[in-house]
Image: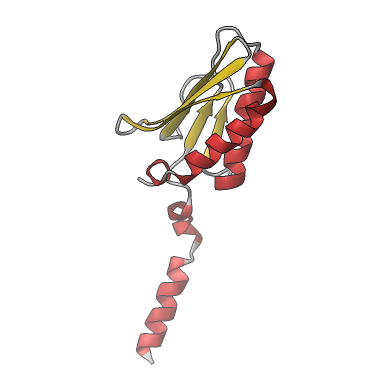
Amino acid sequence: MYRCINVLIMLIIATYPANAEKNTAVVRLSINTFTSVDIDAALIEKLTSVLYRELVVLRGDEYVLYRKKGGLDKSANRQLAGSVEKIDSVYYITVKVLDGERGEHLFNRTCTADRDNLEKTLKRIAKDIHRVNRIWKR
């Protein structure tokens, strides 16, 4: 009887709101706006938001943040940086994910795409990032 009461008390304490901070996201990925030398800012912003939206769908908005103005988000311990460049009619997309706590390079991908397949390529990159457990675990 006492054992059942102790178990019930432990379950009640475990669900108490004071312990809610333990359930919050530990790993947070901050997506910085892509950079480019010769592509207009509107397209860069659109491509960055495609990657962001796809990662939110795959991981959830508690794990993925979006920094539109650059700089580092101190609430995130992972940083995603990327660039998009165009040579002739081919776009080169480079994406990196860095661990800000350990200074490690967790993900690196460079892909090529034509104008019609830019969004599809970014969604594929988002799925690849989603699958890398090192990014989402401490």
Q: Position of residue 122 (x, y in %)?
A: 59, 31
Residue nearer the viewer, 119 or 6: 119
Q: For residue 51, say whether it is visible.
A: no
Q: Quadrant of the C terminus?
A: top left
What is the quadrant of residue 100 in the picture?
top left
Q: Quadrant of residue 11?
A: bottom left
Snapshot colouring? secondary structure
Residue at image x 39%, y 80%? Answer: 7
Query: Residue at coordinates 65% horizontally, 13% vertically from top-left?
Result: 41
Q: Is residue 79 left or right of residue 51?
A: left
Q: Quadrant of residue 52?
A: top right
Q: Residue 131 vs residue 49: left or right?
A: left
Query: Residue at point 47% right, 47% down?
Result: 25
Please identify the quadrant where the N terminus is shown.
bottom left
**Farthest bottom residue in view:** 1
Towards the viewer: 93 or 50? 93
In the rendered view, would you say 132 is above or below 34?
A: below
Q: How many marks?
A: 0
In the rendering, at what x and y percent does residue 65 appear? 55, 34
In the picture as drawn, the residue positioned furthest to the top comes out as 38
- Res. 20 visible in picture: yes
Residue 110's spot in the image, x, y percent?
Answer: 47, 25
Classify 6 as above or below 117.
below
